[in-house]
Structure formats: structure tokens, C-alpha cells
Image: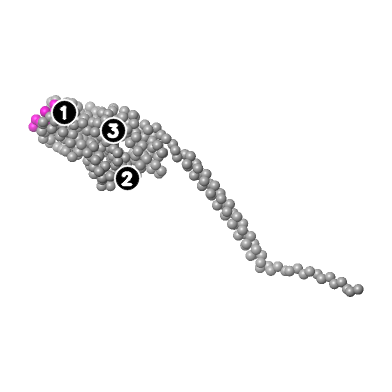
Amino acid sequence: MGAVVCRRRSRRRRDPRSRPRREAAEGTVVLKRLSLVAVLASVVSVTAVSLTACGSSSGTADPGSGAPASGAAAGASSVTVFAAASLTESFTELGRRFESAHPGTKVTFNFGSSATLAQQITQGAPADVFAAASPATMNTVTDAGLAASPTVFVKNTLQIAVPADNPAKVESLKDLTDPKVKVALCAEQVPCGAAAIKALDAAGLKVTPVTLEQDVKATLTKVELGEVDAALVYRTDVIAAAGKVKGIDFPEAAQAVNDYPVAVLTKAPALDLAKGFVDLVLSPQGADVLTKAGFQAP
């Protein structure tokens, strides 16, 4: 019987240098799995945020508050309004109300001669809203393609402003033709000056002023300081002077009524807030403020 030979299976010895390679490969697989999990988590997070944003962007607002229908402009916290000097008091009040309805928003005003403001806008001055004291000055801006669809929101009429004690005893437009009466008028190229000329022409009168001012506030100041005996200014400015001057009505003023248009500028940096402010001006709340200031409904 032949001998049975039992061969012992020899174990193959592993190369110790292969362990680092195997561990590195396993580590790579783990890292890839972790990266995939992170990517999936990011996708879920972004989707959730997008859905939340879509669900919260469709708010509407009370038109009387001047809030934009689609919410405040992203990142916009201020709105710049260029407005005729005669709107100073009423627009300042509307600005306070707008800021109250839009916490964190600042309304910045540039009040002055409508003609000067229109020129500044056409020369590139940054502004969101323009409110002028005449359609002619608004046309300067619309003709340049910088405003569209202006809306007339109020009218204004002239009065003769005299010092409270009326030392020159002015009672009518004709009294302003007396060489002894010192008169201040707005310059012809600004709305209050154009209106004054129209009223004087309607009366067939010629007045030689001692000074021509660039806006109605500067003209009225001459009366307040006693530098002139009379001036042709808007009724609203006499009311705003709060007793410092006296206003005298005259019939020819009906021939020189000024329409006031307002418009959002096409290059408005804060377009939504600009629309909101104009909405406030045109709202019943805005009309109430303007009427109390002496303006008339259009």
C-alpha cells in the first residue's frame, strides 16, 4: 500500500505594502459617499428655500400707505423725490407717512424750482420721482424719455402776498403797478413766474419787479423779511407761512391756474418704492394732506 502523503497547503503571505493601498481605496469610497450625501442635502435645502420665497412674494398692500403691490424692492431702502418748492410742506408730511408705513425706508427730497429740477434730471441726477408745478416743466423730462405717463394730482392758484401789516396798503393787482410799491416775482422760466405773467396779461397790466427769484419760496421770503411790499406767489405758500404774511385774492388768478403732474422716472433706482410713493400721493390720504395745504383737486 503506498504511503499517503499529506501536503500542507501553504498560506500565501500578504505583502505588507498592499495594506496602505487597500485602506486608501476604502477611504476614497467613504469620502465619495459622504460627498454625495452632502450634495443631496444641499439640493433639498435650496429647494426648500426657493419654495418658501415663492410662497412669500405675493403680498398686496393698502394703496393709501404707498406700499408697492409686489413688496419693497430688493435691497432698496431709500427713495429720492424731486419736487417743486411749493410742495415742500405737504410732501414732507407725505414722506413721514411713507416712512412710517415702510420701516427702514428713507424718503429723500430735493425741493426747488421745477425748471431747475427738470434740468438736473435730464443731466443725469439720480432720482426716482418728479413732481412739477407745471406740465411744461414735466414735458422737459418726458420729452427726454426719462418719465412716462405723468398724472396731474393737484392745482394751485396765485395770491398777492403782503407783510402782515400791509404797509403799502396793497388791495388789488393794479396796486402792484405803482412805482412806489416794491414787488417781487418769480423768474419767467419757472412755473410761478409764468403764472404771474399770465395773470398780469389777463388783467392788461405791467409790473416792474425789484427782484426776480428762482422759486416761489425765495420770492415769498422777500415779503417775510420786509424787503418788498408784495409778491405774486401760490396760495399754498401763503398758508404755509402761518401768519407771517397776508394773502390777497384777485380775479385774474383764475386765468393762471397751474396743474401739478407727478411721475415715476424711467431710470428710478428704487422703482417699486417710487411707484409706492406716487400711489400715496394719488390716494385719498394724499389728497387730504394736499387739500389741507391749500391745493385744489385736479
Residue type, mark 3 in image: Phe
Residue 179 appears left or right of 156 = left
- Tag 2 and tag 1, C-beta contact below 8 Å: no
Judge by depth and name the residue closer to the eye, 12 or 282: 282
Find residue 208 and report its horizontal and vertical position in percent: 11, 35
| The furthest residue to the right | 1
**What residue did someone put label 2 on?**
267
Of helix, strand and loop, which one carries label 2?
loop
Give the camera-side residue of 124 and 88: 124
Indicate which disc residue 156 carries: none
As helix, strand or loop, the secondary structure at mark 1 comes to helix
Q: How many marks?
A: 3
Determine the image quadrant of residue 291.
Answer: top left
Q: Residue at x 37, y 33 (%)?
A: 63
Q: CA distance from mark 3 to mark 2?
A: 22 Å
Q: Quadrant of residue 164?
A: top left
Image location of residue 110, percent across then percent down: 28, 40
Task: Tell me if I can see residue 223 in this picture.
Answer: no
Q: Amino acid at mark 2?
A: Lys
What residue appears at the point 39 percent right and 34 percent down from the top-left corner? 101
Amino acid of disc 1? Glu
Q: Quadrant of the C terminus?
A: top left
Q: Which residues make up the magenta segment?
A: 172-180
Vertical comparison of 65 with 268: above or below:
above
Give the labeled residue for mark 1. 252
- Residue placed most toward the observer, 99 or 150: 150
For the residue carrying disc 2, how many other residues have a C-alpha within 10 Å: few (<14), some (14-19), or many (20+)? some
Q: From the viewer's perspective, is residue 135 above or below residue 1?
A: above
**Mark identifier at residue 153:** 3
Q: Secondary structure at mark 3?
A: strand
In space, the residues marked 1 and 3 are separated at their CA atoms by 23 Å
21 in magenta: no
